């Protein structure tokens, strides 16, 4: 039998508020519903239509503790892990199955913007000169990023060229 691979990489938005629990040994575990978007062909309209797919993700260990204060609904996560399939018989005697991604590495890509303002802070106003200056700088930086062409994979540093030429024998030059 050949070796098999059970590896999953997902990047999506946290669809529901995460549920935190403790295992009998005291370890923290977080259950997250991660929503990803795919495109599927719609036969009725003849176009590609977005389809939202939800995945159950289980976070544990140090990654769960690290995200304890920042993980919320609307956050964008990148998860690396493996698929786990479970079967059990429910209280009503029906056989049930569940599929979940058990995360081995998690990275918070974007934290959600808090919906309510910080207690005691004045509400932000567009008339505030500091906010207007920040927005002007942000818009200028965004415009520069949109105009600037992307860097080439094989730039001046030569690092990419060295990686690309690993399979080729090295040629000696006479000096």
Image (cartoon, grey):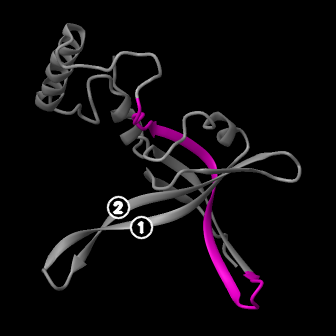
Which residue position holds label 2?
37
Categorize mark 2 by other alpha carbons within 10 Å: few (<14), some (14-19), many (20+): some
Pinpoint residue 74: horizontal percent, then vertical percent. Answer: 42, 46
At 60% from the left and 33% from the top, the residue drawn is: 69
At 18% from the left and 11% from the top, the residue drawn is: 133
Pinpoint residue 44: horizontal percent, then vertical percent. Answer: 16, 85
Instruction: Find residue 92 and report its image quarter.
Output: bottom right
Q: Quadrant of the N terminus?
A: bottom right
Spatial CA span between label 1 and label 2:
6 Å
Q: Quadrant of the C terminus?
A: top left
In the rendered image, residue 72 lying in the magenta stretch gets the answer no
Secondary structure character of the magenta stretch overall: strand
**Which badge, 1 or 2, is on the more N-terminal residue?**
2
Check disc 1 and report its element: helix, strand or loop: strand
Is residue 5 visible from the viewing direction of this image?
Answer: no
Do residues under tags 1 and 2 come within 8 Å of each other at their CB atoms? Answer: yes
Which residue position holds label 1?
53
Q: Is residue 21 above or below residue 129?
A: below
Q: In this rendered view, identify the residue nearer to me: 172 or 167.
A: 167
Q: Is residue 102 above or below residue 125?
A: below
Pinpoint residue 145: horizontal percent, then vertical percent. Answer: 18, 27
Q: In this rendered view, identify the residue nearer to me: 154 or 5.
A: 5
Check disc 2 and report its element: helix, strand or loop: strand
Residue reaching furthest to the top: 129
Q: Which residues are magenta?
A: 88-116
């Amino acid at each position: 039998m050949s070796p098999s691979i059970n590896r999953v990489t997902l990047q999506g938005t946290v669809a529901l508020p995460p549920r935190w629990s403790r295992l009998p040994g005291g370890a923290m575990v977080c259950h997250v519903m991660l929503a990803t978007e795919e495109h599927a062909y719609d036969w009725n309209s003849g176009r590609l239509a977005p389809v939202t797919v939800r995945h159950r993700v289980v976070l544990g260990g140090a990654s769960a503790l690290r995200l304890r204060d920042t993980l919320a609904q609307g956050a964008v996560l990148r998860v690396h892990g493996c698929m786990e399939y479970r079967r059990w018989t429910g209280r009503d005697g029906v056989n049930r199955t569940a599929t979940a991604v058990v995360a081995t590495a998690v990275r918070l890509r974007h934290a959600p913007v808090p919906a309510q303002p910080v207690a005691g802070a004045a509400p932000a106003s567009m008339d505030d000169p500091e906010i207007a200056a920040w927005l002007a700088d942000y818009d200028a930086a965004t415009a520069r990023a949109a105009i600037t062409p992307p860097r080439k994979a094989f730039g001046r540093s030569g690092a990419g060229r060295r990686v690309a030429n690993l399979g080729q024998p090295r040629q000696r030059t006479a000096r």
